[in-house]
Image (tube, rainbow, N blue to C red):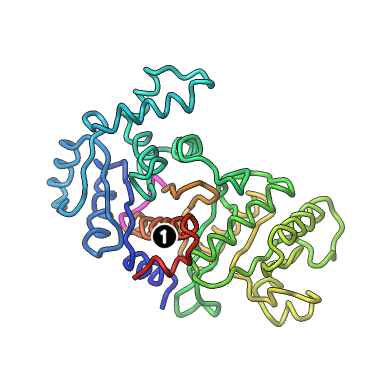
Amino acid sequence: MKAIHRIIDTARRAPMRIVLCESEDERVLAAAARATREGIARILLVGDIGKTQRAAEAAHIDLAGMELIDPATSPLTDAFAETWYGMREKKGMTREQAAEEMRSPLGFANMMVRLGHADGSVAGALNTTADVVRMAIQIIGVQPSFQLVSSFFLMMLCEPFHTMKGGLIFSDCALVVDPDAAQLAQIALAAADSASALLMEPPRVAMLSFSTSGSAKHAAVDKVVTATHLVQAARPELAIDGDVQLDAAIVAEIAQRKVAHSQVEGHANTLIFPNLDAGNIGYKLAERIGGAKAIGPLLQGLNRPANDLSRGCSADDIYYVIGVTCVQAQAAQAKLTGTSPLATRP
């Protein structure tokens, strides 16, 4: 089964409440209708209800089964504004500014997630990545176990011509430009969690470099080695190789020759790039030349799931991100309750 199909099936077993705040966009409405029809999520549409309904009618999209919420009239808005004011008063925010931001669909949707009225958020079809990420970090917040929010792509190798099959996590390819060793370790730890939740198999992490096992001497290599040691100290049980070149990370025969005492043995499913140059180039090479399907950029390290979309996304892209967000929300809920994610799925 393709990796994305496993994610969709997992989402369907325990649909979570996913809020979409760009409800006047035809692509968002089409994805929401499909997610509702196929039972992978309980959709909350935030925005001007009249405009949402007119957009749906014009596109012949049925909104049955979804909850429509207008921040301008919702009984939650005043309480959300007061909460937001309390969070940002020391930053200089006024009550009027807090009220204005909570009347915006993006701010309102993120506060729904923070306060437990929704389990995850998807935005970015109309809003910029900068706004989506900023509001998610400020309102939903960073997990206590992490110091930063990073991103990843879920890369799917499912075509007949792919000799390597399945899903891979690529991180960070969109957010943290030049992480230091501590930040790179944080990215790797978050990506390992993403792999556990979405690939549904133990993470096998490769800390990528132009060097393998110290074959090159450079400060850039030292950073990767130090980050690897930090990850190992934090999670001794995690399978991780670093510093390691890409071929030794994903080809068993090469790993046998290049990597002594490898924990990953050429079967990495989580690739950690040393900086954003490498990550962005790497995922686009895999997508454009390698024919991989790229879903993302997705966010990791937040208290609760919130994901970004490309403004050029299709309805299918949004549907898949809804499915991913649902599975992330299942994992977050399981972590809070101290149960296995599978235990929450009937």
* Mark 1 Cα shell of 10 Å, populated few (<14), some (14-19), many (≥20): many
Task: Compare residues 208 and 339 and report the one nearer the observer.
Answer: 339
Task: Give the amino acid type for the residue marked by disc 1 in the picture.
Answer: Gln
Specify the quadrant that holds the N terminus: bottom left
Q: Which residue is mark 1?
A: 330
> Residue 334 appears at what percent x and percent y?
46, 60
User: Measured along the vertical axis of the image, is residue 122 above or below residue 4?
Assistant: above
Task: Compare residues 83 and 284 and report the one nearer the observer.
Answer: 83
Task: Compare residues 264 and 247 and report the one nearer the observer.
Answer: 264
Q: Residue furthest right?
A: 217
Specify the quadrant that holds the C terminus: bottom left
Residue under the point 54% across and 64% down: 195
User: Measured along the vertical axis of the image, is residue 281 above or below residue 308?
Assistant: below
Q: Is residue 282 left or right of residue 157?
A: right
Task: Compare residues 48 and 74 and report the one nearer the observer.
Answer: 74
Helix, strand or loop at mark 1:
helix
Residue under the point 33% across and 56% down: 16
User: Measured along the vertical axis of the image, is residue 78 above or below residue 249?
Assistant: above
User: Measured along the vertical axis of the image, is residue 338 above or below residue 131?
Assistant: below
> Residue 295 appears at what percent x and percent y?
45, 59
The magenta region covers: 310-315
Q: Is residue 254 left or right of residue 8?
A: right
Residue under the point 15% across and 53% down: 64
Residue under the point 47% across and 61% down: 294
Q: Is residue 143 left or right of residue 311?
A: right
> Residue 207 appears at what percent x and percent y?
70, 61
Q: Quadrant of residue 263?
A: bottom right
Magenta-colored segment: predominant secondary structure: loop
Q: Is residue 146 left or right of residue 230?
A: left
> Residue 147 appears at what percent x and percent y?
63, 43
Whether residue 174 is in magenta: the answer is: no
